[in-house]
C-alpha cells in the first residue's frame, strides 16, 4: 500500500478548508463537545454544500453525485468535522436516499430526493422496536393492505431525531412467508399523518436524542412502498452496510482526539501536565495508533468494489472498533478534566470545548449498542468471515 499523500487529494483538502473559511460564521462555527446544532443551522449548511455540489458525491450523477474516490469523500467529512460544521441529515443522504435511488420508482425519486438535497425534509429511521433491536427479523409493526392504502399499527423505539423529522422510512410486516425476513416491507411514512405520536426517551446524558414512535391505524398510500411487498429485508441489508460505516464515527473521534491532546497539554496535576504522565501518554498514543489503523480500514470499506461476506464482515469490524474508539476518547477526556468535566456551560475563564465532556461520555455508552450491538457484530464476523 502506498501511504504517500496524493497531491490532488491534498489540493482538494485545501479547497475544502477555503470553502469552509469563506462561509458565514452563522453557518459554520465551532461548538462545544456534545453540542447539537439546530435545524436552521443544519439546513443552511446543507444548502451551502449542495450549492457547491458536495452534499451527495456518492449518489448517481443524475441526482448530484460526483463519482469521487473514497479518499476524496473521506477528506470532505474529515475536514467538516474538524471545523465543527453542522451535520448533514446522514439518515437521508447515506441511508434512505441511496435506497430510493436504487429501488424506488421514478415517481418516488422525484418526490423525495429533492427534499433531501434542499434540506427542507429531514428523515428518521423506523427500524428498532421493543422486541426487535439488533434482530430486525422480529419486527412486529403491521401494515394491513386496504385497497390503495396500508393501515400501519405498531411501536418503534430508539428512533433518532423522530421529533424533528418530516418523514420516516419504516420496516413493517405486510405478509408472512416461510421465514421471518420474508414478511418485511420498506415503507415511507409522513410523520405528520394522523395516528402518529412521538414520545421523548431521555438518555443518560439528560438529552433528547431518541424517541418512541407509536403508529395507531396510520393510513399510508400504497405508492409509498419501496420496491415489492416482502422484499424489505433485501433493501435493509444494503442500507445497514452504509449505517455501520457512518456509526464508526472516525472523523468525529479524530476531532475529539485533537481536543484531548490540547487538554492534556494544559491540565496540571501536582504541578505537571497530563501529557507529562507516562501512563496517560501511553494510553493516548495507543488510541492514536488504533484510530490511524481504523482510518485505513474505513477507506477499505468505502472503496470496496465488490459486496459480499468479506466486505460485510469488514464493515462489522469497523463499526464495533470505531464505536470503542469513540467511547475511549471521551473516557480519556473525563480523566483529563476530572470534576470540571461535569460542567455543561463554561464560564468566561474556560474553553468552550470543555462544555459537555461528561454529557458526551455518558451518551457515548450507547455507541456499542446503536446500529447493532458489539455482540451482534462479532457474531456476524464469525459467520461471514470465519464461517463458524
Image (cartoon, rainbow, N blue to C red):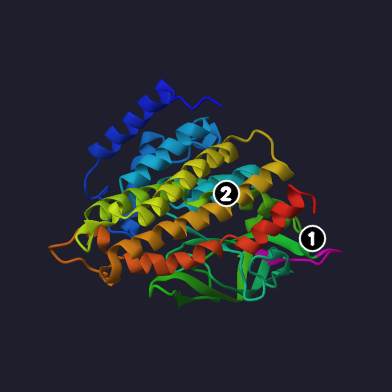
Give the secondary structure at mark 1: helix
Label 2 to label 1: alpha-carbon separation: 28 Å
Q: Residue at horizontal 51%, vertical 57%?
A: 324
Instruction: Locate residue 16, reporting x and y percent.
Output: 34, 34
Quadrant (top left, top right, bottom left, bottom right) of the N terminus: top right
Q: Residue furthest right?
A: 178
Q: Residue at horizontal 65%, vertical 63%?
A: 375
Q: Is residue 183 left or right of residue 61?
A: right
| Location of mark 2 (residue) | 318
Q: Is residue 215 left or right of residue 120?
A: right
User: Majority secondary structure of the magenta segment?
Assistant: loop
Question: Label 1 neighbourhood size at 10 Å, few (<14), some (14-19), many (20+)?
Answer: some
Q: Residue at horizontal 49%, vertical 31%?
A: 66
- On residue 182, which mark appears? 1
Instruction: Locate residue 192, reporting x and y percent.
Output: 49, 68
User: Which one is closest to the eye, mark 2 or mark 1?
Assistant: 2
259 over 180 or under it: above or below: above
Magenta-tinted stretch? 171-179
Instruction: Locate residue 233, reporting x and y percent.
Output: 72, 56
Viewer-closest of 59 and 317: 317
Give the secondary structure at mark 2: helix
Question: Label 2 neighbourhood size at 10 Å, few (<14), some (14-19), many (20+)?
Answer: many
- On residue 102, which mark appears? none
The part of the image, by quadrant, that contains residue 335 is bottom left
Does residue 119 appear anywhere in the picture? Answer: no
Viewer-closest of 108 and 303: 303
Q: Earlier in the sequence, mark 2 or mark 1?
A: 1
Does residue 240 appear anywhere in the picture? Answer: yes
- Total numbered badges shown on the rendered structure: 2
Amino acid at each position: 500500500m502506498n501511504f504517500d499523500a496524493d497531491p490532488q487529494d491534498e489540493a482538494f483538502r485545501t479547497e475544502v478548508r477555503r470553502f469552509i473559511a469563506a462561509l458565514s460564521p452563522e453557518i459554520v462555527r465551532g461548538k462545544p463537545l456534545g453540542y447539537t446544532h439546530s435545524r436552521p443551522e443544519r439546513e443552511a449548511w446543507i444548502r451551502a454544500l449542495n450549492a457547491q455540489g458536495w452534499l451527495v458525491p456518492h449518489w448517481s450523477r443524475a441526482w448530484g453525485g460526483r463519482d469521487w474516490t473514497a479518499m476524496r469523500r473521506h477528506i470532505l467529512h474529515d475536514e467538516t468535522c474538524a471545523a465543527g460544521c453542522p451535520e448533514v441529515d446522514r439518515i437521508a443522504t447515506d441511508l434512505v436516499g441511496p435506497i430510493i435511488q436504487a429501488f424506488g420508482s421514478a415517481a418516488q425519486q422525484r418526490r423525495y430526493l429533492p427534499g433531501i438535497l434542499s434540506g427542507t425534509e429531514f428523515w428518521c429511521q423506523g427500524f428498532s422496536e421493543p422486541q426487535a433491536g439488533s434482530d430486525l427479523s422480529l419486527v412486529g409493526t403491521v401494515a394491513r393492505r386496504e385497497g390503495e392504502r396500508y393501515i400501519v399499527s405498531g411501536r418503534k423505539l430508539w428512533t433518532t431525531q423522530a421529533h424533528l423529522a418530516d418523514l420516516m422510512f419504516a420496516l413493517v410486516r405486510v405478509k408472512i412467508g416461510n421465514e421471518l425476513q420474508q414478511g418485511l416491507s420498506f415503507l415511507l411514512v409522513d410523520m405528520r399523518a394522523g395516528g402518529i405520536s412521538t414520545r421523548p426517551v431521555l438518555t443518560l446524558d439528560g438529552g433528547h436524542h431518541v424517541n418512541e414512535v407509536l403508529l395507531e391505524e396510520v393510513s399510508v398510500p400504497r405508492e409509498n412502498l419501496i420496491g415489492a411487498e416482502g422484499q424489505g429485508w433485501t433493501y435493509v441489508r444494503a442500507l445497514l452496510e452504509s449505517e455501520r460505516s457512518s456509526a464508526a464515527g472516525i472523523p468525529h473521534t479524530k476531532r475529539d482526539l485533537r481536543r484531548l491532546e490540547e487538554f492534556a497539554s494544559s491540565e496540571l496535576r501536582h504541578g505537571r501536565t497530563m501529557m507529562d504522565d507516562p501512563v496517560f501518554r501511553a494510553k493516548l498514543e495507543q488510541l492514536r495508533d488504533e484510530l490511524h489503523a481504523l482510518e485505513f480500514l474505513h477507506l477499505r470499506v468505502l472503496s470496496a468494489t465488490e459486496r459480499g461476506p468479506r466486505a460485510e464482515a469488514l464493515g462489522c469490524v469497523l463499526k464495533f472498533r470505531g464505536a470503542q474508539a469513540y467511547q475511549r476518547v471521551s473516557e480519556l477526556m473525563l480523566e483529563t478534566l476530572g470534576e470540571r468535566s461535569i460542567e455543561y456551560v463554561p464560564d468566561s475563564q474556560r474553553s468552550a470545548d470543555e462544555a459537555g465532556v461528561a454529557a458526551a461520555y455518558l451518551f457515548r455508552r450507547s455507541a456499542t449498542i446503536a446500529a447493532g450491538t458489539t455482540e451482534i457484530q462479532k457474531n456476524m464476523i464469525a459467520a461471514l468471515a470465519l464461517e463458524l
